[in-house]
């Protein structure tokens, strides 16, 4: 019982709750639509607050809900301190925070500091004020190359395709690392720095518990002339001095943010989305003097493979132990093909995420994906992830075992990445952003009273919350039970690997006696006497079936 109480206080301690949290990502426009306009909204989240509580998560992370022209699903923010009127009002936001807090669920919001929307008043002011103006200094404007400045300043590419520079009416060019509608801020500018501190305080004052920082590694840039070419950039090491990415000086910003977080009681927290070259470099974002935590995407890009999982887990736990942070785990989010689909695809060239991409790009041919196998493996991987030390970030719909929707007609797609080429060329990310099914019948499967903003396929009915809620064998029931047990079993303590005699079977033990066995292979794995202590997952004839996970816990620890 002492163990249980200790664990409970670690989870609920307001200063460190995030270290071992299960965080559920809500993509607000696709979660629940209360006013029937086809877009999810904040009152919709309130209407599903009981669902979230019953699921057993510790916090939600909301993707952007700010005023936006939706050039990039809301990651083009026109006003950092307001709510998109199609999604609600600030009063709705307060009501949502209150409804979630009442249920013991904390709230993390997305901060997008690398770029604003081109409709942000500062950018509009910069356009109007013209070259050489103070207003242009807040962004990154340059003269073009070529005789009349008709060429972009460099040949750099934007992540969503095309040049990273766009020319404005008076002939100058501005830098946009993502869509044209997302001009990059100049983080050397004191007003930019100050304004984000104001934004952090604004949401903290409204009761927000933490922040997810979009492309946290890209804010500071060394744009000393002459600017390097694309080829030169690619040849430069990512050692903290790269002109565009993961520069050491970005941490000065997060140190300042930390001071703001610590003005609050309990201190606010941060999690960095930082695509950097190594766990060591990632750890800098997660330091106690910085944001506190950083996403670890290593499992998200791994195969469903025992050796890869073992190595990734060991490396990241070692790194987090060395840095004093707690690691994070992610299998799905709003940017990648859902893992229940990724894991059901045949081995194509490259990594599994690449497989998902290739499949979507090819129009999602049904005969490429084995949905049953994908779901079986996804359940196994999710149970493993939920048993690891550190925070687990879950993406809305994965608790239903929801599959990617690849068959979205081009004229109904929204993701700029689908249309513009670039690294997301021709696949886009709409397929994981389709509004989730709440009921097996009815308009937009219970998402709202009208059609959803992205088309939902008929097979969504099978994954609906009402169907899965009443089925003890459903993925939803499995997640609920896993999250319930995790609240009791999760501790800060690290794991120890247990030899299984099989390369395709991973087993680890936590100091409180919690054991986890994942069979990545297809041959059953005999559990011996431990079969009697399985508290989650299926055992068949005393063995762990292929592609599945079981949790074992000594009697007594669960308090019954
Ligand atoms: C990362 C976000 O997750 C993604 O959705 C967005 O397109 C880019 N950052 C640009 O903001």
Image (tube, helix red, strand yellow):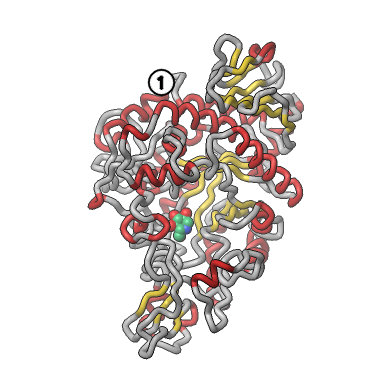
- Quadrant for ligand 1? bottom left
Q: Residue at x 44, y 34 (%)?
A: 340
* Picture quadrant of residue 435: top left
For the residue labelled by badge 1, is the local secondary structure a helix, a strand or a loop?
A: loop
**Residue that carries the numbered disc 1 in the rendered image:** 470
Q: Is residue 125 above or below residue 549?
A: below
Quarter of the image containing the C terminus?
top right
Taking the image as shown, residue 303 lies to the left or right of residue 318, namely: left
Q: Residue at x 41, y 51 (%)?
A: 92
Which percent across, then down, holds residue 209? Answer: 58, 51
Counting other residues with Cα less than 10 Å from the Cα at mark 1, is it few (<14), some (14-19), or many (20 or more)?
few
Q: Is residue 266 above or below residue 478?
A: below
* Picture quadrant of residue 521: top right
Q: Residue at x 57, y 15 (%)?
A: 539
Q: Is residue 26 visible?
A: no
Taking the image as shown, residue 39 lies to the left or right of residue 529, namely: left
Label 1, ligand 1: CB separation under 8 Å: no
Taking the image as shown, residue 546 lies to the left or right of residue 289, namely: left
Q: Is residue 226 above or below residue 14?
A: below
* Picture quadrant of residue 424: bottom left
Quarter of the image containing the N terminus?
top right
Q: Is residue 149 visible?
A: yes
Q: Residue furthest front?
A: 349
Which percent across, then down, holds residue 442? Answer: 25, 32
Please name whichever residue, 140 or 51, is drawn nearer the observer in this view of the structure.
Answer: 140
Which percent across, then down, holds residue 137? Answer: 49, 82
Which percent across, then down, holds residue 512? Answer: 74, 27
How many discs appear? 1
């Amino acid at each position: 019982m002492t163990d249980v109480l200790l664990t409970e206080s670690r989870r609920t301690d307001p200063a460190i709750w995030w270290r071992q949290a299960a965080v559920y990502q809500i993509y607000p426009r696709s979660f629940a639509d209360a006013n029937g306009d086809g877009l999810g909204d904040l009152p919709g989240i309130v209407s599903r607050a009981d669902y979230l509580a019953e699921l057993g998560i510790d916090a939600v992370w909301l993707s952007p809900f700010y005023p936006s022209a939706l050039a990039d699903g809301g990651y083009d923010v026109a006003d950092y301190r307001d709510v998109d009127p199609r999604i609600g009002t600030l009063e709705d936001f307060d009501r949502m925070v209150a409804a979630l807090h009442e249920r013991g669920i904390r709230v993390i919001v997305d901060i997008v500091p690398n770029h604003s929307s081109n409709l942000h008043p500062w950018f509009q002011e910069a356009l109007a004020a013209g070259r050489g103006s103070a207003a242009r200094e807040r962004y990154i404007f340059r003269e073009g190359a070529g005789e009349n400045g008709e060429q972009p300043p460099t040949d750099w590419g934007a992540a969503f395709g095309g040049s990273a520079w766009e020319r404005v009416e008076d002939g100058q060019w501005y830098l946009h690392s993502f869509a044209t509608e997302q001009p990059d801020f100049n983080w050397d500018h004191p007003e930019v720095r100050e304004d984000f501190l104001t934004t952090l305080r604004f949401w903290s004052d409204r009761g927000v518990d933490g922040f997810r920082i979009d492309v946290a590694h890209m804010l500071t840039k060394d744009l000393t002339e002459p600017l390097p070419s694309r080829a030169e950039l690619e040849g430069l090491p990512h050692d903290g001095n790269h002109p565009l990415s993961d520069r050491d000086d970005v941490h000065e910003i997060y140190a300042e943010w930390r001071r703001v977080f610590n003005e609050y009681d309990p201190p606010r927290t941060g999690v960095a989305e930082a695509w950097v070259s190594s766990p060591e470099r990632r750890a800098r974002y997660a330091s106690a003097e910085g944001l506190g935590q950083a996403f670890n995407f290593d499992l998200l890009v791994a195969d469903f493979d025992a050796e890869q999982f073992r190595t990734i887990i060991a490396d990241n736990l070692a790194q987090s132990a060395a840095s004093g942070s707690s690691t994070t785990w992610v299998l799905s989010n709003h940017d990648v093909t859902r893992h229940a689909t990724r894991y059901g695809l045949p081995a194509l060239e490259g990594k599994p995420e690449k497989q998902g991409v290739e499949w979507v790009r090819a129009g999602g041919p049904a005969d490429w994906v084995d949905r049953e196998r994908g779901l079986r493996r996804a359940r196994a991987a999710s149970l493993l992830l939920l048993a690891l030390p550190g925070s687990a970030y879950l993406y809305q719909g994965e608790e239903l075992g929801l599959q990617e929707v690849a068959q979205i007609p081009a004229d109904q797609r929204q993701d700029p990445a689908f249309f513009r080429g670039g690294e997301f060329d021709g696949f886009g990310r709409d397929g994981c952003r389709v509004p989730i099914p709440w009921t097996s019948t009815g308009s937009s499967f219970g998402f709202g009273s009208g059609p959803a903003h992205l088309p939902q396929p008929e097979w969504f009915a099978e994954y609906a919350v009402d169907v899965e809620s009443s089925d003890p064998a459903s993925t939803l029931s499995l997640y609920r039970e896993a999250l319930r047990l995790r609240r009791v079993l999760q501790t800060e303590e690290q794991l120890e690997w247990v030899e299984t005699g099989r390369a395709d079977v991973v087993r680890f033990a936590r100091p409180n006696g919690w054991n986890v066995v994942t069979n990545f292979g297809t041959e059953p794995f005999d559990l011996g006497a431990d079969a009697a202590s399985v508290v989650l997952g299926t055992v068949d004839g005393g063995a762990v079936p292929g592609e599945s996970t079981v949790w074992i816990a000594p009697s007594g620890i669960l308090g019954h």
